Amino acid sequence: MITATSSTATEARQFAIEVAQLLADTKCEDIVALDVRGLSQVTSFVVIGTGTSERQMRSVSDDVIELGEGTGHPLFRMNRERSSTWTVVDFVDVTVHLFEPNTRAFYDLDHLWLDAQRLAWKRDGADSRPRA
C-alpha cells in the first residue's frame, strides 16, 4: 500500500488544493478535491475535474505535471492517449482525474468517493470557476 506518511500528508493535501486551483484557473469545471485517506489503498487525495475539450485536457495535464515538478511532487505515471476522454495524472499521494463530461458521468467517481471528505480549495472570495 502506497500512501502519504503523516509528515508528507500535509504537503500532499496542499498540493491537491493547488491542483484544484490550477484546474479552476484553466477553466475546468465541476472541480472536486477529496481526502481519501483510509478509503483508498493507492492514494491519499483525489482531484477530479471536467475539461471542455481534448486539447484543453492535454494542456491542463501538462500544467499539472509542471506544478508537481515545481513543488516537489514528481510525476509517477500518467495515462493520456491522443483521443482520450479520461486522463489520469498520478503523483502517488495525489491522483488527478480529468474527464470529458460524458465520461465523467459514466464512471461517476464522485459517487464512488461519496464518503471522502471534500477539501476546501477555493481561494478566499473566489467562485469555483474563474470569471471571464
Image (cartoon, helix red, strand yellow):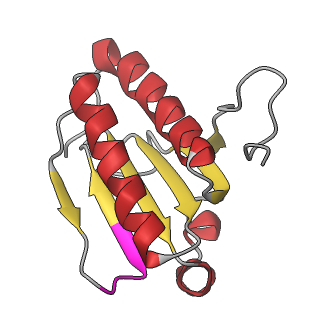
Residue 85 in the image: above or below residue 21: below
- Residue 100: image quadrant is bottom right
Asked whether the viewer can see residue 116, the reply is no
* Magenta stretch, main secondary structure class: loop
Name the residue at 78% across, 49% down.
132
User: Which residues fall within the magenta stretch?
Assistant: 83-87
Closest to the observer, 75 or 61: 61
Residue 1 locus on image (x, y percent): 19, 46
User: Residue 82 is drawn in which quadrant?
Assistant: bottom left
* Residue 119 found in image quarter: top right
Residue drawn where x is 21% and y is 31% of the image: 69
Q: Position of residue 48 (x, y in %)?
A: 53, 57
Check residue 84 for magenta coloring.
yes
Q: Is residue 129 left or right of residue 109?
A: right
Q: Position of residue 88 (x, y in %)?
A: 33, 63
Observer-nearest residue: 20 or 83?
83
- Left or right placement of residue 19 versus residue 1 in this view: right
